[in-house]
Image (spheres, helix red, strand yellow):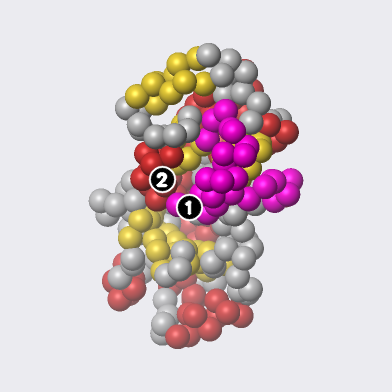
């Protein structure tokens, strides 16, 4: 057996030398495990674990903060992965009976790499964790811009059962900055917050990005209706044509797994490059 200290729980966790049965209650951790080639060891996942497509066929054991303990007992997992934030209390509750390893919700893009490495460490797959993290770092470095003379102001909104945007303590704000932009709510002392939409008139964002609720049937014409309902037709991002619907139907920005670096960041960089080319380099 191994003993591994977990910073979130503040105690040592006893784990087998060889991990064979993993339960992941977080979509980003599930994606990371599959990308390490460990999908065969994943015994069960949450209802929201949809990446990669193979994860959807795994046994569903709960949601973000609920777990069917009868199923959990029948699986007898070697380790259960959770994330902090919304799942913090769930991790403490489950740790009274099971070997739970909660990971920190990333506040930076590099925090995503740290999460991937820690997953590998927890399950004793040191090489696989570090290899995936190194690959992601290389992709990230390739995306970084050179000298930034002006940072386009971005307003990003996600429907998480209501309008949500992100403040200073978010990997999303960090990603926008790394790629040469500026989050209009980036100085708010919060991870996420409900936006004051009236404030946007004075801020005058250069770019607007909207992410619809996961699995919703939301299209560009729905975004146009949303803009009309808010009286935004005179906003700078409308007149410039720099407003975008994030690709769906899965979480796109609201997902902090490896695909955030592989898919979301290149998409965001493309939008920033369009702005730079049209309005700053002409």
- Is 75 colored magenta in this rendering? yes
Q: Is residue 249 left or right of residue 151?
A: right
Q: Classify 188 as above or below 224.
A: above
Q: Is residue 114 left or right of residue 123?
A: left
Q: Residue at x 50, y 14 (%)?
A: 2
Mark 1, other Cα within 10 Å: few <14 / some 14–19 / many ≥20:
few
Q: Nearer the viewer, residue 140 or 68?
A: 68
Q: Is residue 238 left or right of residue 153?
A: right
Q: Quadrant of residue 106?
A: top left
Which region of the structure is painted magenta? 54-80
- If you read the primary sequence from the N terminus, does the residue marked by circle 2 or circle 1 appear first? 1
Judge whether residue 134 can be spotted in this image: no
- Residue picked out by circle 1: 66
Mark 2, other Cα within 10 Å: few <14 / some 14–19 / many ≥20:
some
Secondary structure type for disc 2 = helix
Q: Classify 210 as above or below 132.
A: below
Image location of residue 55, percent across then percent down: 69, 46
CB under 8 Å between callouts 2 and 1? yes
Q: Classify 218 as above or below 94.
A: below
Judge whether residue 222 can be spotted in this image: yes
Q: Residue at x 48, y 30 (%)?
A: 99
Q: Residue at x 46, y 45 (%)?
A: 175
Alpha carbons under labels 2 and 1: distance apart: 8 Å
- Is 164 colored magenta in this rendering? no
- Residue picked out by circle 2: 90
Numbered label attached to residue 94: none
């Amino acid at each position: 057996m191994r003993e591994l200290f977990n910073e979130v729980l503040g105690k040592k966790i006893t784990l087998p030398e060889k991990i064979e049965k993993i339960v992941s209650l977080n979509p980003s951790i599930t994606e990371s495990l599959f990308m390490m080639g460990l999908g065969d060891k994943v015994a069960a996942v949450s209802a929201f674990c949809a990446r990669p497509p193979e994860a959807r066929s795994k046994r569903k054991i709960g949601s973000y903060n609920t777990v069917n303990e009868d199923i959990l007992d029948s699986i007898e997992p070697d380790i259960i992965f959770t994330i902090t934030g919304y799942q913090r209390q769930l991790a403490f509750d489950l740790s009274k009976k099971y070997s739970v390893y909660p990971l920190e919700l990333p506040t930076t893009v590099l925090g995503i790499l740290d999460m991937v490495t820690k997953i590998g460490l927890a399950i004793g797959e040191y090489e696989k964790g570090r290899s995936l993290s190194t690959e992601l770092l290389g992709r990230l470095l390739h995306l970084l811009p050179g000298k930034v003379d002006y940072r386009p102001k971005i307003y990003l909104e996600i429907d998480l059962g209501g309008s949500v945007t992100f403040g200073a303590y978010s990997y999303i704000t960090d990603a926008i900055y790394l790629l040469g932009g500026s989050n209009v709510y980036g100085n708010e002392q919060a991870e996420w917050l409900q936006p004051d939409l009236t404030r946007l008139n004075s801020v005058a964002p250069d770019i607007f990005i909207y992410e619809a609720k996961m699995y919703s049937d939301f299209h560009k014409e729905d975004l146009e209706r949303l803009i009309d309902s808010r009286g935004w037709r005179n906003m700078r991002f409308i007149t410039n044509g720099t407003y975008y619907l994030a690709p769906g139907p899965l979480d796109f920005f609201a997902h902090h797994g490896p695909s955030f670096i592989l898919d979301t960041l290149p998409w965001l960089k493309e939008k920033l490059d369009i702005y730079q080319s049209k309005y700053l380099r002409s």
